[in-house]
Image (cartoon, helix red, strand yellow):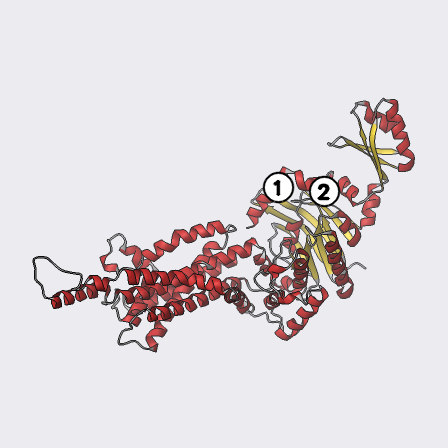
Amino acid sequence: MEEEGINSGPLHGLWAVTNRELKKWYKEPFIFIISLVQPIIWIGLFGKAMNLGEIFSAGSLNIPGLDLPKQIIDSLSQEVLKSTFGTTNYFSFLAVGMLSFIVLFSAMSSGMTIVWDRRLGFLNKMLTTPLPRGNVIMGKVLSSVIKALVQAVIVLLIAVLLGLTFSAQFSVFSLAITFFALFLLAMGLSSLFIMLAIKSTRWETQMAIMNLLNLPLLFASNAFYPVKFMPYWLKPVVMVNPLTYANNVARAMLIGVTPTASVAFSVLYLVSFAAIFSFVGIFLSWKYISS
Amino acid sequence: MTDPIIKVVGLTKIFNHTVHAVDHISFEVNRGEIFGLLGPNGAGKSTTIGMLNTLLKPTEGTALIDGIDVTKNPSSVRKIIGVVPQEYTADEDLTGWENIMLIADFYGIPRDISRQRASELLEMVGLTEASKRNVETYSGGMRRRLELAMGLINKPRVLFLDEPTLGLDVQTRTAIWEHIRKLKSEYNMTILVTTHYLEEADEFCDRIAIIDKGKIIKADTPENLKRGVGGDIITIQITKDGKDVDLALKGIQGVTEIKNNSDGFITLKVVDGGAVAPEIIRALTQMNLNVTRLTLTRPTMDEVYMTYTGRNLREEQTTSEETFTMRRTMRKARS
């Protein structure tokens, strides 16, 4: 009965698991579009509504009693913006921050799929086949990474349409580095959220975990504001948050903001983050996926 | 002569150090046999199947599938078994075709082979047309047939069916069993099946093991099981209960056993039911007791089940608080 051509290699079925998740996604474009709405709203509301560039300009800023020339106010404002955000364009600053935001939200939902698979018995079905255990998790991580990066591309395109201006040094190379950093972030975050879901049977628990972590992770990073004006107690949190490093890389590469930690260090930090969490995730799944 | 393909010795599963879901069971299943596991909820059927199909790790004991140890070499076991779980596991967002091909990929079957095999299997279960539609549009019977096809994609030597007809209407249940029978005859496949429906087990299984509280109470062919119960069964209902009723009934020739059921019925095991029944009525009438109902039955699987487990399977399902608690515990333990 043993047939020829059966693939029992350690990676067999990996693409099948990945593609299953992706299929559910591209067969249901509505969900795909919905997931893009939020970061776009953030770009629109935060980036455009809070128009810092306009606030700090001679048109709106006028100090009574002092008859400062328009030029001085303008250049003063530009300097304030530049020293705060590293760029005079707050919209660009925020739009780039939204790339790690979409990666975070996309990766977060990856844990949900494993909870559903467990509840609906699909996980058990997978586990009775010769599919290597690690591939169950790797496939989910991989599909989540692909989804996150596709969404990041779309968010970036929309940001460009809305007026994101690249730095003078911008090239294909800087784009590649940026997406490499986002890839690492997606990899680590997906592994983390799948790991948190591995023993869970209730999607309510998973929702609670997601709600507990999403906004704190987002706001305790440099996605909206630069680190240097944060209170001392918040800084350490922000400095371990991987989102901060992804933003550092993306801002340095795309809009030329000099980062608080160097690009090389940031990339290294993200490499370790992704490596540790995907390794631990696969190890734990091996151990805990079945009883 | 016998050629066991499944060999289970002292298999035990203890959840949370306290719940003995399966307690040192041993049995053998012969090649090409349809072997039924019968028992109430929480008896340990699903846990037994779970250990045999490598989902659960046994606490103790060994199980061999075609000579391969399920604990020592689970990945080799997975290649030669097919599993159709109790739940509907097919992905609702994918089509029937996509689902079966997905499972084929999990087994690492090359595309050219799996494509051909998938269309054969879908043809066999009558889903060729529907296979282009998303599974969410399928009826219960269609889903079950798809699960069956999915469980067969690797041409398993042993197929595990956990409650294959649960919740389906009678017609669909018969159709599913016809498929199972066809598999047995065409591929000489060994099938291990659990079921709630006693008449199905009676009709379709070659051998049946009655399992209760984690132990196998009796394993034999349906005919032998029924014969083993001995004689006919008379069930009577009387207007009121008397102390001497038992005594009077015992005095009647041909009555071998009397059992007072909790629901006010008295079950008697008798040698020649047709002759004994009038005697029973006469004796009770003499005692001024009115027999309001009398039924005479040849032994069926229900009686067999009743005799060996002391319970009625149908009542068990709906009323037992204990079973419910145990199931909940086990579900939590398993997750």
Q: Residue at x 30, y 57 (%)?
A: A238
Residue B66 makes an appearance in the image? no
Foreground residue, A167 or A118?
A167
Displayed quadrant of residue A250: bottom left
Above or below for B249 versus A101: above
Q: Residue at x 83, y 48 (%)?
A: B224
Can you identify the residue that label 2 sits on?
B313
Q: Are marks 2 and 1 on the same chain?
A: yes
Relative to B219, is A115 on the left or the right?
left
Cα gap from disc 2 to disc 1, whole angstroms: 14 Å
Total numbered labels: 2
Relative to B271, is A162 on the left or the right?
left
What's under tag 2, amino acid-wise? Leu
Q: Residue at x 72, y 66 (%)?
A: B124
Displayed quadrant of residue A33: bottom left
Foreground residue, A90 or A128?
A90
* SS assignment at label 2: helix
Tag shown at residue A21: none
Disc 1 chain ID: B
Q: Position of residue A204 (x, y in %)?
A: 48, 49
Q: Position of residue B62 (x, y in %)?
A: 65, 54
Disc 2 chain ID: B
Above or below for A162 versus B92: below
Q: Position of residue B179 (x, y in %)?
A: 74, 60
Can you identify the residue that label 1 sits on?
B324
* SS assignment at label 1: helix
What's under tag 1, amino acid-wise? Phe
Relative to A273, is A230 on the left or the right?
left
